Image: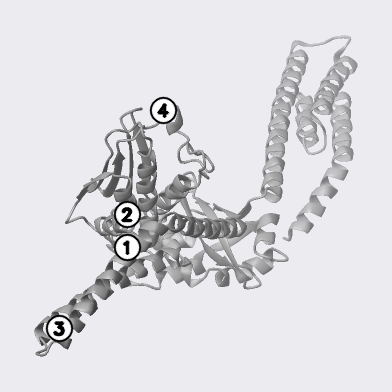
Amino acid sequence: MPVHMISRSGNSMSRFSPFVAMFIAVAIFALDTLTTFDMAIAVLYVTVVLLALSFATKKNLLVIGAGCMGLTLLSFAVSHGEDPTSDATARCFVSLSAIGITTFLAYQVKTGIAILRESEQRYRTIFLATGVAILEMDFTLVKAAVHQLKSQGFADIRAVAAKDPSFASKAIAMMKLTKVNNTALTTFSAKDFNTLKAALPTLIGEDMEGAIWALLEAIWDGRPVYESETMMNDVNGDRIAILYNVAMPADRPLLDTVLVSIVDVTARRQAENELHAAHTELAHVTRIATLGELTVSIAHEVNQPLAAIVTNGGAGLRWLKRSAPDLGEVETAMQRMIADAGRASEVIKRLRTLSSKTTPQAAPVNLSEIAAESIALVQREITSHKISLRTELARKLPLVIGDRIQLQQVIINLILNAIQAMADPAVATRTLLIATTRAGDAVQLNVRDSGTGFAATKAAHLFDAFYTTKADGMGMGLSICRSIVTAHGGRISAHSEPGNGASFEFTIPLQEEPVS
């Protein structure tokens, strides 16, 4: 029977129930008063009390119960008031007891119904009005299919995937949508429940296949909750990023009631992408500023091979102008010219790479090699500040996944900070150590100087944006270093004993392939 017909029928019954109860009460009173049956007729008043459950409030229910007891006493007074027998008195007592107990129990039932109704109303309000999309689904067929696969001897869901890759698609078709809230309709741009129900299979794209297999694994293992983040389509075909939670209550082993909570994180993902783009832009600007500080070192690095090219070119010409040209010496001079040109080209190539505005490219890299390239670019700064450089770069360092340019930026920044920390005339011995090593499941790089160090109270703020200990500093270098290292899944830290220098170190975890 349709819901609206049941509702209309229930309303009609509630409307006529008071009249029916009144009629039954009058009939019982008349029968009890005017007849001489040897039985407790007044016990029938319990039907009036029970009928009152459908229309009376808790207070009125007590009034009706008291009224029925009053009618019982009145009938007893009229029929047996002058000469009450022990049997009649006993029947009256039994009737009063039955009516009283029934009224008390009916009152308790009414209270329970009121609590249940309030709870259901609260649940319905939360379900419909919450800002999280909620889908109530029936996974009974999926649970049965998983149970059947287990009975067939499959060890786990991976074995099922290997044997029947199409099972995930079949499972999607088995999932039945039974109820949704208003937020779910808004999230998926559906005008009503039936629209969303009909479109649901098409909303799950191919990129959700991995998430579906993971959900099936959770069902296979009997886990009560599964959570993931993925992309879906809405009814109009637009892509939305969602974070969803599938709750499979332990008290519903057949999974006939499963709640899927969905949060649309499309705007958050867009904001994160924009923030990432801003970080990349800021890192690029900082690299350009760093290159500006290294102008003298860069000029020296380029000038050396160019001067050698001129020298070797002159020597080659002199050998050619001799009365008996020495072609062997000419060839040697030309080879040295080519080698020096290669050196100059490598320097320019590294500079172009650092100054280029490109998106980060994750690839297997050797941190020791990147450190050596970075040292070459700042070698002039190290020499001009009369700093003793010591390197301990591990030769057989495991590869890590990272962006070469960004990691080089971090190392150069840390080296320049160390050089500036030792620029104070009060620093007698200027020693710089750059070391790489493997640290458990990560690769570590350490830059240690013998400068003035920093106070322990400053350690917690060194990597904060716009915090600087330099008079002319911007406070962005170390902040960007932390952002880059964190984006690589690593950590960066600083240690110091005032007067004994500072040590900055960062780690990059070992990975076989970039994390998507």
Task: Spot the residue most to the front.
Answer: 323
Instruction: State the CA–CA distance, disc 4 to disc 3.
Output: 63 Å
77 up-or-down from 515: above or below: above
Amino acid at circle 1: Glu
Quadrant where the N terminus sits is bottom right
Per the rendering, the mark at residue 380 is 2
The mark lying in front, picked from 2 and 4, is 2
Residue 370: quarter of image:
bottom left
- Residue appearing at x 11%, y 90% in the figure: 323
**Which residue corresponds to the image point at 52% horizontal and 57% vertical from the top-left?**
276
**Mark 3: which secondary structure?**
helix
Tell which of 291 and 363 is nearer to you: 291
Q: Residue at x 61, y 53 (%)?
A: 134
Quarter of the figure that contains the C terminus = bottom left
Residue highlighted by disc 3: 319
Q: Is residue 323 rendered to the left or right of residue 367?
A: left
Mark earlier in primary sequence (4, 3): 3
Residue neighbourhood size for the residue with mark 4, other residues' Cα within 10 Å, grouped as few (<14), some (14–19), many (≥20): few
Under circle 4, the secondary element is loop
Q: Given this view, does label 4 or label 3 mark the residue nearer the observer?
A: 3
Dot 1 corresponds to which residue? 301
Whether residue 160 is visible, yes or no, is no
